[in-house]
Amino acid sequence: MDKNNNIRKSEFLEQIIKLQSQVSALYIYGAGIFANNILKFLRKNNIKVKAFIVSKRDVEDTFDIPIVEVKDVVGDHSVGIILGLNQHNAREIKVYLSQRGFPDGNIIDGGNYLENGGERLGFAGDAIMEITVRIGCSIHCRFCPQDLLLKNYYKGDKNRASVMTLDTFRECLEKIPKNVGIVFSGFAEPLSNPECMKMMELACSEKRNVDLFTTLVGADMETVKKISALPLNYVGLHCADKYGHAKIPADEDYYEKVKFFLSCKKRGTDRPLVDFCNTQVEPNERIAEIISGKYEVGTALFDRAGNLEGEGLVRKKNLHGRLKCSMCGELTNRNVLLPDGTVVLCCMDYGLMHLIGNLKTSTYEEVQNGKESQRIRDGLNGNEDVPLLCRSCSCAREVA
C-alpha cells in the first residue's frame, strides 16, 4: 500500500515537472490546507511556486509567498495553475477558468490527487495518533455527536477513566513509534485537561511531529504563551461562531487570547503559528474582525460518517465495493487514543464502532495488526459482509 502511495506521488510530481517545463511560472489556486500541503510538497522537490491564487484577495500575505487575485492571472496563458482545492470548489474554478479561455492543459488538479490518493491532510503519508485527553467536551458543539460518544464509552463500565493522566499518556507514548505524528485533538478540547500542556511538552521534547487543534478554552494567557513557544507542526484554531453552536465563552479574555495566538509565529520561522481557522457556521462579529485580512475561515460541517443528522451537513452513504479514505488512503493508521488507552479507528468513530486495541495492554504493532484492524482492512478491500463505518463516511472514496 505504501508502494502504491509512492507511485501516486511520483505520477503527480511528473505531471508538475512536465507542466513546469512548458510554462513561465507555476501558481497554486487556494490558500487553505490543501494549497499549503501542495506547496510543502513542491518545495521539498525544489519546484518554485510564484504565488497563491484566490478568487478575492481578502487575506494578507501571511505565508512566505504572495497571494494574488485570479483576475490578475487568468489572462496570462503562459502560466500553469495547480488547484489546491476540495473537489466541490475545484469544479467551480475549472468552469471559471474555462469560460475565460484559460488552457485546460495548463491546469493540474492537486486537490483531486490529495483526496483520491488518501493524502488530504498532507503528502507525508505518515501515521498519526490523535489524543483524546478526556471524555465529555464542555464546548459541546452542535455539530459534534458527544452524546453518542458518552453513551458508548461508558456502556458496560460507568467507572471507566474519563480523563487521561500524564502517566497514561507517557505509558502509551513510549509504545508509539517516533514516526507516528501526535495530534492533540480527538473527541474533546485538548486544553480542557489540566495536564495537556505537560503532555505536549513531553511529545515535543522527543522531537516528534506534534499538531494541535484547539478552541483555547481551558487555557489562561500564560498557558497560551507557553503553547506558542512549542515547536508545533500544524495548528488549527476553532473559533466562536455567530449563533453560539460551539459553546465557547466569548468574553474579553477569550478575544485577547485569540488575538495573541494569531499574532504568533512558528518557532524559528516567519510563518504564522496558526495554519487554519474554522467555525461551526459564520464566525461571530468580534472573531470576524480579528481574523479579517488574515485567514479564510472554513465552515464545512460533516455528518461524522452518519453519526449526526441535520441540514447543511456534508454526507455520503451506502458506498460499495473497495474503498479508500481521502485522509489516509488504503491504510488504517490515523487513529484516536482514548483516556484509558483504548485505540479507535479514526476521528469519525464517535460511536466507537471499531475498537482496534489498547496501548496499555498491547504494543502499537499488535494494535495495528490485531483482529479488528485486519477485519477493517478486509472490509475496505471489498468484503461487504464486514460492518464498516467507512461506507457511510464523507471521507471515503469508492475504488474503481
Image (tube, rainbow, N blue to C red):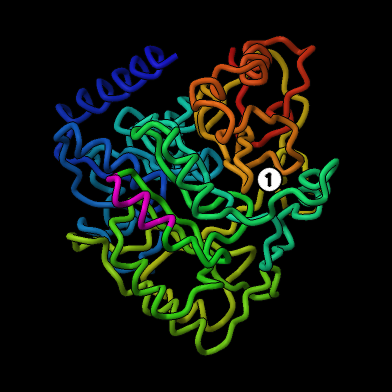
Q: What residue type is labelled 1?
A: Val
Residue 21 in the image: state x and y as whole percent: 14, 27
Relative height, residue 20 to residue 5 (above, below): below
Relative height, residue 6 to residue 102 (above, below): above
> Closest to the observer: 186 or 157?
157
Q: Residue at x 30, y 71 (%)?
A: 264
Residue 201 in the magenta stretch? The answer is: yes
Say left or right for 57 vs 314: left
Question: Magenta region, mostly helix, strand or loop?
Answer: helix
Q: What stretch is highlighted in magenta?
A: 199-207
- Give the number of callouts: 1
Q: Dot 1 corresponds to which residue?
A: 314
Is label 1 in a helix, a strand or a loop?
loop
Say left or right for 399 vs 23: right
Q: Which residue is drawn at 17% across and 34% down?
A: 23
Residue 218 in the image: state x and y as whole percent: 55, 72
Residue 297 in the magenta stretch? The answer is: no
